[in-house]
Image: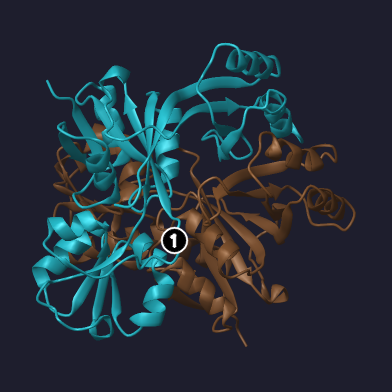
Chain colours: A cyan, B brown
Amino acid sequence: MAATIGYLGPKGTFTKLAVDTAFNGEVKQSFATIPECIDAVNEDEIDIGVVPLENAIEGTVQLTIDYLVHQVRLPIVAEIVVPIQQHLLVDPEFTGSYGELSEIHSHSHAIAQCHQYLHQHIANASIHYTSSTGKAAELVAEKKGSIAAIGNKLAAELYGLRILDENIHDFPNNHTRFAVLSKKENQIKINHPKYSEKTTVLITLPSDYAGALHQVLSAFAWRKMNLSKIESRPMKTGLGNYFFIVDVNQEYDEVLFSGVIGELEALGCNVSILGTYPVYQMNDM
Amino acid sequence: MAATIGYLGPKGTFTKLAVDTAFNGEVKQSFATIPECIDAVNEDEIDIGVVPLENAIEGTVQLTIDYLVHQVRLPIVAEIVVPIQQHLLVDPEFTGSYGELSEIHSHSHAIAQCHQYLHQHIANASIHYTSSTGKAAELVAEKKGSIAAIGNKLAAELYGLRILDENIHDFPNNHTRFAVLSKKENQIKINHPKYSEKTTVLITLPSDYAGALHQVLSAFAWRKMNLSKIESRPMKTGLGNYFFIVDVNQEYDEVLFSGVIGELEALGCNVSILGTYPVYQMNDM
C-alpha cells in the first residue's frame, strides 16, 4: 500500500512543490497548519509529514521547531532543500507588458521577497495580500484582466496561468528547508540523490550564565564536528531561558555523539537528538 | 515637530499594538511590508521604523534581519518586547457560546498558535485564512453572525468586537520582539521604564570550518560577556556560507567590544555593530 504524505497546503504552495519534487506515487494530503500536519503523523492518520523548517514563505519556521520541541516529539527522517523561485503570473489572455499591470496579489512574505523588483518595474500597481501564494494564483485565474500573482511554477500550472516574468525575487540564493517527519523511517523513498547527512540536536541549558553556549560548543569543537546551523530559542517557560538547536554535518554515531552527550549532561544540560537523516538538495524547478 | 513613526501594518496587528503601547503623540504611518518600512526610514520619509525581529505573527523575522544586513544598514536604537495574547473576537450581538461558532477567521500563524484550543473547544467550526489578524477582525465586524476572529485587544477595540474568550493561545509565554530603527537616536522617547541594555553584533566568518563558531564565541566567553541570543543565517551568496547574529546583554563600550572586534578581525572575520540600545519590556496589554 502506498504511503500517505501530509503537507502544509493549500495547493500551489512551496511545500507542495517540494513534496511533488521529492515524492512520487504516494497519496498526498494537504493540511491547513503545521500543528495539524504534525498531529496527523503522531496519531497515525498519515505516514509522513512534510513541514517547513527554514526560510519559508507560507509557514513560520519557529512554529515547526517549537511544536516538535514542546508538543509532539517526532523524528526528522529527511530534509529537503528547495530553491525559492518567484514568478510573475498572469492570465494567458493578458497580452500587455508588466508596466501595464494594475494589481499584484500574493502572500505578504512573497511580496516582500520581490520588493525591489516591484519597486523598480511595477511601482504603480496596487498590492493586495492573500493568505498564500497559491490563493493569489487562484484569484488571478478567476478574476482575469490586467492583474498578476506572485507565485511558483506549480501554481502557474495548477491554475493555467502564464509566467510573464521569471525569477523576480530580489535575492538569487533563497532556499527553503523542509523536514520530513515519520515514525516509519524505512517507508521514505525520495527520488533524488542524497546530498549529505545531518544530525539535529536539542540542548537545554540549566541556567543562563555567561559563556554557557561557548562551553556547549566546546564539546563539538574539540571533536572537529562541524555545525551548519545554530539557533537559540526562548523556552516557553519565561524570558531568559533558552534552548539551542544545533545541526551537525554528519550522521549520528555512538562514539562521537555519545561523547558529546555525556559531557553536556555532566554540565547539567538536557540533550535530545531530534533526528539523524539524509539531506536532499533539489535544483532548478 | 512630532516625529513620524512607520510600522508594519495593517491596523489591528501586533506591531501596531507595540507601537501604540510604546509611543505617544507621534504621527503613525502604516507600511505594507518590512522592506517598505525600512526603506522609508532610510530615505528620510519617516523618522522611526518599527519592525518585528522575533516570533512575529504577521512578519518574518528573517526578512527583517536579512534586509538590514544585505540592503539597508540602519541602526537599531531600541527594542520593544510585547506578549502575544490571542483572543476570540465576535460581533457584540452574538450571544451564543463558543461551541456554537461556525467559522473561525485569522492569519494562519495565529490559527496555529491557538491550535490546541480550537481542537478542544471549537472543533466543528471551519477555519478560514486571512492575510493578517486585523483583516480577520474587520471581516467579522462586516459579516457578523456566528463567526469569530482570532486577534488582539486592539483589533477588538478598532472594529467594535466583543472578546468572547481571552488568552486562547496554546503557549503562555509567547513574546514578540520589535526593532526600533532610526538615524536620529535622540528622537526616541518610549513611555516605559528601561528593562535592560543590549548590543547586536553581526559576524561573518571567512570560511565554514569545524569549530569556527566556537572560536568566535571564545572572544566573548573569556570576557564574561553574556549572550542572550545567537543565530546563524545563510549568506545569500550560496549554500554553506553563514553569518551570525549575536545579542550581547550589555551596552557597547570601547574596552570590551573593541577587544572582541580586534580578535575576531585577526581571525579573518568581518564584524559590524547593528546597534547598542535599551530594551523595553511591555507587560499585560
**Rendering quarter of residue A225:** top right
Is residue A12 found left or right of A169 in the rendered image?
Answer: left
Q: Chain of mark 1?
A: A
Q: Residue at x 67, y 43 (%)?
A: B228
Neighbour tally class for label 1: few under 14, some 14-19, many 20 plus, Cα within 10 Å: some
Residue A106 pos. (x, y %): 28, 65
Q: Residue at x 44, y 24 (%)?
A: A275
Q: How many marks?
A: 1
User: Residue pushed farthest right?
Assistant: B255
- In this orientation, does residue A226 appear? yes
Placement of the N terminus of chain B among the 4 image quadrants: bottom right
Q: Nearer the viewer, residue B128 or A263?
A: A263
Residue B28 pos. (x, y %): 49, 77
Residue B188 pos. (x, y %): 67, 72
Is residue B253 found left or right of B169 in the rendered image?
Answer: right
Q: Residue at x 35, y 33 (%)?
A: A193
User: Residue pushed farthest front?
Assistant: A193
Q: Nearer the viewer, residue A47 or B13?
A: A47
- In this orientation, does residue B144 appear? no
Is residue A194 found left or right of B227 in the rendered image?
Answer: left
Residue B261 pos. (x, y %): 81, 53
For numbered disc 1, what is the local secondary structure?
loop
Q: Name the amino acid, label 1.
A: Pro
Residue under label 1, please give it: A172
Q: Is residue A196 above or below residue A135?
A: above
Q: Nearer the viewer, residue A60 or B180?
A: A60
Q: Is residue B183 above or below residue A259?
A: below
Q: Residue at x 42, y 35 (%)?
A: A195
